[in-house]
Image (spheres, rainbow, N blue to C red):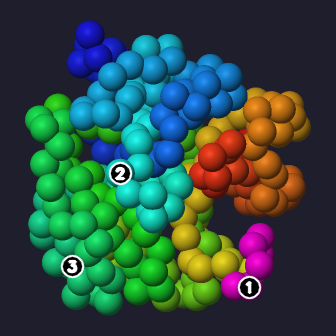
Amino acid sequence: MAENRASVNEETYGEGVPCWVDAELPDVEAGKRFYGELFGWTFEEAYGSSVWALLAGDRVASLAPKTDGRMPTVWTVSFATTDAEALGRRITAAGGRMVMAPFPVGDLGTAALATDPEGAVFGLWQPGTHPGFGRRREPNTFVWAQLYTRDTAAANSFYGGLFHDALFGTEARPDFGRAVVTEVFPAEMPPHFVAHFRVTDLDDALGTVQRLDGRVQAPPFETSYGRVAVVTDNQGASFALLQR
């Protein structure tokens, strides 16, 4: 059934396009309750012990249990690639680092985890039967990835070299921005990605986050891509809500 659902709005994601987000949580059941109420997601079993998050039957994210308590509770943004091994070599050559070398996820695809030269962590996804988001850019789905960095020019050079067409191509419609970390977070915050989910009413969504024992990290602020607030869920995973 999951395979049929995933194909409803199936899309092919070009090299360097954000194509998936997943959360590693101490308690997946608690995550299902939190995000189910916040975004109206339903859930079904996925690969291993992870679960698909579904909106109107289409895959929009996944939740997985943390296998090591020392690892952060975090949302990870993954970028599409046709060849994770080759992209990993390019990342290393450009000054980044491979945290997890490409590995198969059943027949779903091949995943990897990398950092840029400043240490911001991101994922790679080479699709098999799972192409990525079944829905995106609409309410209660992924809409934007923001990299908070100390050097936006260096970030543009690094990611532009890896994902030029997705970011700067003539037909590019990027869902990926770069900003100086101190614009939103304290100066000591390390560079990192924040996954943004679209909402129809930001203030109402913030009320729901707080009612569900999440917290507001950065209250609403205006950006070129919409009105944003950064929050954490009730287990400490950071993400952003975006109204546009």
Can you say whether 91 is above or below 202 in the image? below
**Residue at point 31%, 33% (across, down):** 49
Foreground label between 3 and 2: 2
**Residue at point 17%, 32% (across, down):** 129
Q: Amino acid at mark 3?
A: Arg
Count of labels in the image: 3
In whole angstroms, how far apart are the C-alphas of marks 1 and 2? 30 Å
- Residue under numbered circle 3: 90
Q: Which mark is residue 177?
A: none
- Residue under numbered circle 2: 67
- Residue under numbered circle 1: 187
- Give neighbour class at mark 2: few <14, some 14-19, many 20+ (Cα, 10 Å): few
67 to the left or right of 63: left
Query: Of label 1 and label 2, which has the lower sequence position?
Result: 2
- The N terminus is located in which quarter? top left
The residue lying toward the viewer, choosing from 86 and 46, is 46
Foreground label between 1 and 2: 2
What percent of the width, then of the height, locates residue 156?
48, 79
What percent of the width, then of the height, locates residue 19?
38, 46
Element under label 3? helix
Residue 112: in magenta span: no
The residue lying toward the viewer, choosing from 47 and 13, is 47
Q: Kindly indicate the quadrant of the structure image that contains residue 222.
A: bottom right
Q: Kindly indicate the quadrant of the structure image that contains residue 143.
A: top right
In whole angstroms, how far apart are the C-alphas of marks 3 and 1? 30 Å
Residue 186: in magenta span: yes
